[in-house]
């Protein structure tokens, strides 16, 4: 008998902690993890590799759509157990493009700087949403819990609770002050050895903060699926909370919702 899908939507601005919370809870609860930002990042990597970044030309946009259709994006552990990324010190979800592990490549500053140009194009958003829906239906590559009563999926991004899965079973909006987010992202990039630009020059905290503010602005003001809090989202400001505290809050709300469903 197939289990009921249980969708957890986690939205919020850049570097607010969506992935850290999603990855930790996906492992703990045995839920599938779909990182929608990684799909926009993969699209950007594909555009750069195919010299198609200039998507205002219809020819380029059509080709990009074809490439996205042909490309298989998967997310999951590297081996049989979730990878422990020693530089991040928690389990992390690996991202594969036609089987190639691009997890670090898509975190590079070159991708981060260009992703906004693609994320605002309706055709690219439609292709990305199609991939997100496919991934939600795909096999969970993480270890599921034998006692689980649901087929759980955590989907994270900017518009999951508002546009992609407006009927999600539970929604969170995770936010933090821009300076706290920039500091965390800067420390993470240093730890992963990814704090360099395309020329190999080091990137400092101020540049990361500027990028985060610019991405906030773009995400909030784009016409299609801007970043918004869903009316029924549980809002968590993580500025003064540890990752463990945030994970604890999200987990207890999910467990409460699951218990309510069992009672129904
Ligand atoms: N509450 C917290 N306290 C300290 N560090 C945190 C906290 N939450 C997340 N972090 C760290 O901050 C960094 C950014 O978090 P994360 O990658 O989860 O953000 P995100 O919202 O998924 O970002 P993006 O949207 O840009 O992908 C990571 O290194 C993560 O481990
Ligand atoms: N649902 C989403 C998710 C992401 N984006 C855009 O992609 C960029 C990269 O996302 P990260 O979560 O990896 O930072 C982000 O800056 C957004 O512009 C989106 O539009 N919708």
Image (cartoon, grey):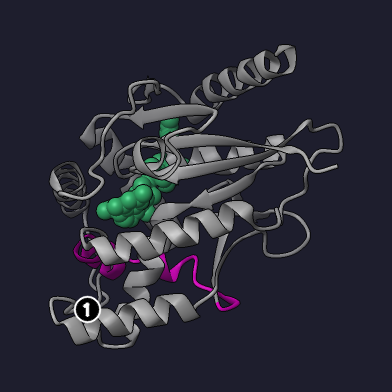
Look at the numbered disc 1 and give the secondary structure of its residue.
loop
The range drawn in magenta is 98-118
Q: Is residue 148 left or right of residue 232?
A: right
Q: Which residue is mark 1?
A: 53
* Magenta part, dominant SS: helix
Q: Is residue 93 visible?
A: no
Magenta residue check for 105: yes
Q: Is residue 22 visible?
A: yes
Residue 7 or 85: which is nearer the viewer? 7
Q: Position of residue 12 (x, y in %)?
A: 34, 36
Magenta residue check for 237: no
> Which residue is found at the position 26% from the left and 70% from the top?
110
The answer to which image quadrant residue 111 occupies is: bottom left
User: Is the CB of the residue bearing disc 1 within 8 angstroms of ligand 2?
Assistant: no
> Which residue is found at the position 85% from the left and 32% from the top?
147
Q: Is residue 226 left or right of residue 70?
A: left
Residue 81 or 11: which is nearer the viewer? 11
Q: Position of residue 85 (x, y in %)?
A: 59, 55
Q: Quadrant of the C terminus?
A: top right
> Which residue is found at the position 72% from the left and 51% from the top?
142
Is 65 drawn above or below residue 49 in the view shown? above
> Which residue is found at the position 40% from the left and 61% from the top?
128
Mark 1 neighbour class, 10 Å CA radius: few under 14, some 14 to 19, many 20 or more: many
Q: Is residue 14 left or right of residue 58?
A: right
Is 124 drawn above or below residue 93 in the view shown? below
Q: Position of residue 76 (x, y in %)?
A: 63, 58
Is 76 drawn above or below residue 252 in the view shown? below
Q: Quadrant of the N terminus?
A: top right
């Amino acid at each position: 008998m197939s289990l009921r899908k249980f969708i957890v939507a986690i939205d919020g601005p850049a570097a607010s902690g969506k992935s850290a919370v999603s990855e930790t809870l996906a492992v703990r609860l045995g839920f599938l993890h779909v990182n929608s930002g990684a799909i926009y990042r993969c699209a950007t990597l594909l555009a750069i590799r195919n010299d198609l970044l200039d998507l205002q030309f219809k020819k380029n946009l059509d080709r990009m759509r074809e490439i996205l259709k042909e490309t298989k994006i998967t997310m999951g552990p590297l081996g049989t157990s979730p990878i422990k990324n020693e530089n991040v010190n928690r389990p992390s979800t690996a991202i594969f493009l036609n089987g190639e592990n691009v997890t670090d490549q898509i975190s590079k500053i070159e991708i981060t700087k260009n992703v906004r140009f693609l994320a605002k194009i309706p055709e690219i958003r439609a292709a990305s949403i199609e991939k997100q829906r496919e991934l939600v239906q795909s096999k969970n590559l993480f270890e599921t819990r034998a006692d689980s009563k649901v087929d759980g999926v955590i989907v994270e991004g900017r518009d999951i609770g508002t546009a992609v899965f407006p009927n999600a079973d539970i929604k969170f909006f995770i936010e933090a002050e821009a300076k706290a987010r920039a500091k965390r992202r800067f420390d993470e990039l240093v730890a992963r050895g990814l704090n360099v630009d395309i020329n190999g020059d080091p990137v400092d905290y101020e540049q990361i903060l500027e990028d985060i503010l610019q991405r906030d602005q773009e995400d909030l003001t784009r016409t299609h699926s801007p970043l918004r809090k869903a009316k029924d989202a549980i809002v968590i400001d993580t500025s003064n909370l540890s990752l463990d505290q945030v994970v604890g809050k999200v987990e207890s709300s999910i467990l409460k919702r699951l218990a309510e469903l069992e009672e129904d």
